[in-house]
Amino acid sequence: MEDSSAGILKLQNRTLQVLLNPSNSSNCTPLIMAQTRKGLKLGGHQGAPHLRPHGTRRTNGGAVEGDLDSLDEEPKATRAMGRPVWVVYTLAAVLIFTTVVDVLGNLLVIVAVLRNRKLRNAGNVFVVSLAFADLVVALYPYPLVLYAIFHDGWSLGETQCMVSGFLMGLSVIGSIFNITAIAINRYCYICHSFAYDKCYSFRNTLLLVALVWLLTIVAIVPNFFVGSLRYDARVYSCTFAQTVSTSYTIAVVVVHFFVPITIVTFCYLRIWILVIQVRRKVKTEVRPRLKPSDVRNFVMMFVVFVLFAICWAPLNLIGLAVSIDPELVAPKIPEWLFVVSYFMAYFNSCLNAIIYGLLNQNFRREYKRIVTSVWSPQLFFQETSRGGTEAMKSKPSPGLNNNDQQGETQ
């Protein structure tokens, strides 16, 4: 140990001599630099100086300035990626756009449901819950990711990293569980409509939403025990590390993605079959209860599901492939593919509010009223939805009621 410390001290003195007398060091600088690298990496020596990215080496006696970036011994997880500037700015632009649209769009969804009586029904409770899940990730984790992008690394500490990773996981799992709950709600309304009122009373709906979030928390907590929430420099995020545990990664992909996707696919497949049967007049007894607005609402939420599956499938398939043999498969995953899959998943959080506005007249009109009210704040509190009745007194379409317009065609 003494020999190792003496060797490192000797190398440091030689390095200082080179820095102070550069004219005499042209021949020996490469050797000293190589030996200094080796000296700094000696195992068991905790007193080796740490050189920061900006080129300042801090010691107990002060600091020596110099262009010593190559000697930086930052942990690999927080080291700069050295990407082209255009790549960094592209990723930042995508995330800024996603964050702004996410916040504004999902706030519009929540306010629209609260203001519009026609939108206040059992089905839309899950829509508000889904909007909240998407909103969570834009209010805290995304800004920290942007900070890491512009600083080319994580410098916010371990606690911030854990909180960011937890909230990001909470948002992702909460989103897929809420989408599953929405699919089950639509299935019960269209395929088992006579039992719908009893199953989805206001009280039962709130209990089901609470259950969704309880399961979400239960699903994310094991990450703290496995130690899988880590900073990934490739995506500038504190997120789930796919290479920590093979069995846990498989469990996460199956429970958090494939099982919900299977349930949603079953529900929507049964609805599609019923809709086709009604269209072909195979089941005429269902026709009076299956209105054109119900079909449109189902199609809209089906689009929400399909876009979620498209945005999240690449990342989950990569995770499943890596879990088979992390040491063999992980290095073979192209970095660009991994980054694109992550930012596709991020982008999904801003899509739902746009879909509601494009495919649903009630939401679209309420969006316009809310935006108009920004210029006339008194209208925000005075204006209420016209022609609506309390949602829970009768059974409107569960979700995005779209039949307020008489004579509206499908």
Image: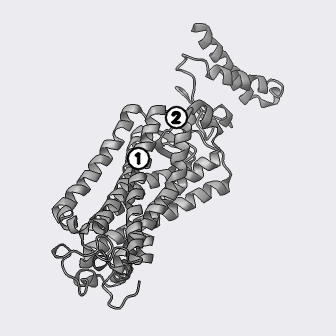
Q: What residue sits 49% from the left and 38% below the top?
A: 241
- Which element is circle 1 on? helix
For disc 1, the marked residue is 256
Q: Quadrant of the N terminus?
A: top right
User: Which of the two residues, 210 or 66, is positioned nearer the viewer here?
Assistant: 210
Classify 401 as above or below 139: below
* Left or right placement of residue 114 versus residue 327 in this view: left
- Disc 2 to disc 1, how far (Cα)? 17 Å
Please state, as top left, top right, bottom left or bottom right, where the C terminus lies in the image.
Answer: bottom left
Q: Count the labels in the image.
A: 2
* Element marked by disc 2: loop
Label 2: which residue? 243
Task: Please state the horizontal and vertical placement of residue 39, each as a whole percent of the image.
Answer: 65, 19
Q: Quadrant of residue 180?
A: bottom left
Q: Say if residue 109 shows up in the picture.
A: yes
Q: Amino acid at mark 2?
A: Thr
Which residue lies most toward the right here?
Answer: 27
Rendered residue at 29%/52% (across/down): 212
